[in-house]
């Protein structure tokens, strides 16, 4: 079945309204279980670095093949049951790839703990959404990590899925989520995953190259909607984004830092080792709870602009196809 603009509208509105209820079946959680089970079969700690890389590549191929076939099969079976069921399958699959509301909800749990003065609870909740160690973070460090993860996930959780939905429909967006989930689970440079997860990390870099840069410019546009100095935000983004080791993460993060007038980055602890991240933005303002609130407004504006962009892409593709 063909994925149409009205399907995307329904999926996006559903994401804003419902988010990600824990009781609801979710393909991305299934993908995570598939990755974990495939890893238990293919990972062998006694293997050489070369064999580790081959095994990691094999895992990537298996997961992508399963996700691709399963998504196509579900849509085909739903379509055979009737057009309405086919439409519902397309909308549901598209909805499960989007996470604007979920990103807000998960981050707000940390913010609520900070507002109540419960630093231990804030650290605990933060650990559920970031990969850095949180047990020793002070209040400012928790807040900085919260703003950083929201800004970075504008690309991974919002813009990239909308981009792939517009171009390739729910099947393409689910394949992207599989690529992104494999990176989040395997793409670490620690002893276990340095070689085994290297292919997953590089594949995610490729998949996010365009969406990350779009995300940065959407944050710049969103800052203009908030009456910020978008030229300064753009300048900071172009100046600081290349500082990051990741070829992609720096664009939405640096743009957000510029829009909020704060400095992100600095020292963080991962797997027992301190990692010194480059500083993004200029320390014009202090990091406060209002900074987080502005980050959320920036996220929703960026999400709305990304949605508008995706609809325009779909309409353009349909128009171009109609005149051929």
Image: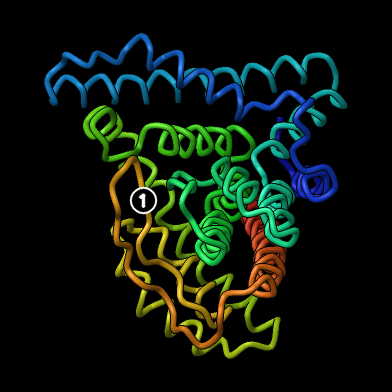
- In depth, the one of 122 and 285 nearer the eye is 122
Helix, strand or loop at mark 1: strand
User: Relative to residue 91, is residue 65 depicted above or below?
Assistant: above
Q: Which residue is drawn at 29% across and 15% down?
A: 43
User: Relative to residue 171, is residue 270 depicted above or below?
Assistant: below
Please state the total of marks drawn on the protein image: 1
**Residue that protrudes farthest toward the top in the picture:** 41
Quadrant of residue 182 within the rendered picture? top left
Whether residue 257 is visible, yes or no, is yes
Q: In this view, does 320 lie to the left or right of 4?
A: left
Q: Name the residue under label 1.
A: 269
User: Relative to residue 7, is residue 257 depicted above or below?
Assistant: below
Q: Which residue is drawn at 31% across and 19% down?
A: 58
Q: Quadrant of the N terminus?
A: top right
Q: Position of residue 102 (x, y in %)?
A: 71, 46
- In depth, the one of 3 and 279 nearer the eye is 279
């Amino acid at each position: 079945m063909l994925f149409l603009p009205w399907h995307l509208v329904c999926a996006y509105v559903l994401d804003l309204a419902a988010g990600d209820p824990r009781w609801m079946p979710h393909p991305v959680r299934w993908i995570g279980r598939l990755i974990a089970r495939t890893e238990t079969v293919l990972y062998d700690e006694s293997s050489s670095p070369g064999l580790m890389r081959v095994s990691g590549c094999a895992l990537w191929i298996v997961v992508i093949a399963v996700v691709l076939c399963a998504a196509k099969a579900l849509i085909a079976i739903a379509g055979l049951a009737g057009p309405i069921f086919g439409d519902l399958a397309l909308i549901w699959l598209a909805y499960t790839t989007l996470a604007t509301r979920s990103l807000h909800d998960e981050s707000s749990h940390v913010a609520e703990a900070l507002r109540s003065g419960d630093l231990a609870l804030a650290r605990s909740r933060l650990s559920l959404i970031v990969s850095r160690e949180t047990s020793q973070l002070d209040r400012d460090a928790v807040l900085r990590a919260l703003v950083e993860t929201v800004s970075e996930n504008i690309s991974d959780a919002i813009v990239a899925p909308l981009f792939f939905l517009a171009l390739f429909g729910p099947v393409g967006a689910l394949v992207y989520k599989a690529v992104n989930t494999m990176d989040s689970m395997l793409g670490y440079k620690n002893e276990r995953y340095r070689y085994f997860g290297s292919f997953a990390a590089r594949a995610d870099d490729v998949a996010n190259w365009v969406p990350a840069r779009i995300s940065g410019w959407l944050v710049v546009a969103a800052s203009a909607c908030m009456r910020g100095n978008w030229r300064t935000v753009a300048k900071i983004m172009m100046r600081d984004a290349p500082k990051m080791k990741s070829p992609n993460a720096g664009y939405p993060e640096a743009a957000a830092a510029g829009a909020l007038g704060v400095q992100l980055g600095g020292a963080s602890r991962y797997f027992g080792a301190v990692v010194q991240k480059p500083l993004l933005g200029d320390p014009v303002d202090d990091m406060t709870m209002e900074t987080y609130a502005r980050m959320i407004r920036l996220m929703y504006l960026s999400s709305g602009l990304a949605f508008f962009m995706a609809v325009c892409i779909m309409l353009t593709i349909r128009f171009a196809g109609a005149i051929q």
